[in-house]
Amino acid sequence: MTLKVYNTLTKKSENFEPLNGKKVSMYVCGITPYDSCHIGHARCYVAFDVIRRYLEHKGYTLNYVQNFTDIDDKIIKKAHAESLPFKDIAERYINDFLKNMDVLNIKRANKNPKVSDNINEIITAVTILIKKNFAYELAGDVYFRVKKFKNYGKLSKRNIEEMQNGARVIVNDKKETPMDFALWKKAKKNEPSWASPWGEGRPGWHIECSVLSILHLGETIDIHGGGADLIFPHHENEVAQSEALTTKTFAKYWLHNGFVMINKEKMSKSLDNFFSVDDILQKYHPMVLRLFLLTNHYKKPLDFSTNKLEENKRRMQKFINFLEILSNFQGKAEITPDITKLENEFYQAMDNDFNTAAALAVLHKLLEYGNKHKDISPKKAQAALIKIKNLALILGVKFELPKKNFPAEINSILKERLEARKNQDWQKADDLKNKLLDKGYEIKDTKSGIEIWKI
């Protein structure tokens, strides 16, 4: 089966053919660490984690780089508010981010370069752009000449003349054209800065990702990814400055994930309509959140609600219950043509631009198959369970049995009910079953034994 990916650059679904055989280079724009990680961030990095995992499952070796924009206006503002160095603020939220990603079972990037550690490399790149006449200095600021780059707009499919006519000059009306963007910013009072040929200052936003990608992955990479909100201007500007620097294609495939939406608006800190990952994890298991984030194709918007989290909590419980039923199975699993067919459906879904929604639907079909056969053919049910667990791991989802540490009172009722069943006192057994239900524990009698789980 051939893996197809939707390329934002060409607006087409294309066969995935890396530049260097089975080696894949991937750069995904990282966070600006000035506040807690929210669900929108989690969706992006879960999506690209699944992309990474699936490529690795298909035998590719990935070199995955994800930066930290650790110098930014928002970080500086918070540092001033707390009377702390900007690096202390950045480190706090970098650690918070990594902790959240670990809990969500997101594999760490091969490298997480920070902007502040690569200032000299950024200065070198800006110097080259000036020498090539793609950039110019203006009173300590350096700007990229957008009109000089003939293909500007090729990623976002925007017309440069239309953009310029609609542009408003906000910061500096002395720029050659309103569309020119900052590569280097002149230092302001009480802000961190570095020495450069143009005086004290700090990098612009866009140049950092170009430099870090080229530095760690090479002049042309296989995959560049990020949220759909980055297509313009961030990724468009990356394309322009990178290809002006190297004269080579910057990235072969551009992949973008859709927004998390609340009340038809994008979840974001600027709109103050976000939920932090920490807030959600106080109420839900990390795998419930991960399941929820995979319920739509990664390119599509995802509506957030507690009802949907609850729905995925119930889905997770069904898988856990099935796992619990067969946890003591000793026989040899029996793979059937039906199971093999469903496994192939999973791969077809993932080969179609990493369609996790369709892939999860296959896991549910396997669950239905397993539940159908658990009493009449435990070997087939066990085979379904093995496939569920293995395929779920490709999605980074772990189905794990909870520890069986029921309260003493519950254990006592279970023991009493077992005795009632042995004595064929079915009325007492039913009464005790209802008693357990009242206390929040559901029980089911099957040929393979007693199933019990907390509601």
Image: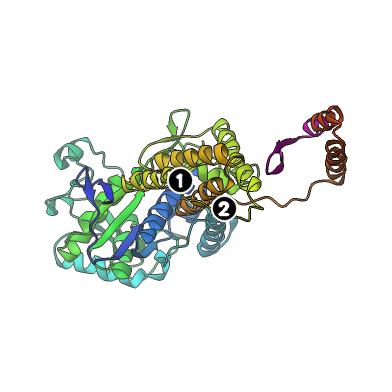
Number of numbered labels in the structure image: 2
Residue 122 seen in this snapshot: no
Q: Residue at x 52, y 51 (%)?
A: 389
Residue 192 seen in this snapshot: yes
- When the figure is inspected, residue 274 is found, relative to residue 95, above or below; the finding is above
Q: Nearer the viewer, mark 1 or mark 2?
A: 1
Label 1 vs 2, first from the N-terminus: 1
The C terminus: image quadrant: top right
Q: CA distance from mark 1 to mark 2?
A: 29 Å
- The image position of residue 5, as x and y in percent, is 28, 48
Mark number, residue 43: 1
Asked whether 437 falls inside the magenta stretch, the response is yes
Q: Badge 1: few (under 14), some or many (20 or more) residues near its Cα, within 10 Å?
A: many
Quarter where residue 100 is shown: bottom right
- The image position of residue 435, as x and y in percent, is 83, 31
Q: Residue at x 55, y 44 (%)?
A: 289
Q: Badge 2: few (under 14), some or many (20 or more) residues near its Cα, within 10 Å?
A: few
Give the SS element for disc 1: helix
- When the figure is inspected, residue 451 is found, relative to residue 17, above or below; the finding is above
What span is colored magenta in the figure?
Answer: 435-455
Q: Please state which amino acid type lies under the numbered disc 1.
A: Arg
Q: Is 19 left, or right, of 441 in this rendering? A: left
- The image position of residue 374, as x and y in percent, is 59, 42
Q: Residue beneath label 2, please?
A: 81
Q: Is 359 left, or right, of 91 in this rendering? A: left
Q: In the depicted view, which residue is nearer to us: 192 or 72?
A: 72
- The image position of residue 244, as x and y in percent, is 17, 61
Quarter where residue 16 is shown: bottom left
Q: Is 60 left, or right, of 426 in this rendering? A: left
Q: Residue at x 63, y 52 (%)?
A: 329
Quarter where residue 96 is shown: bottom right
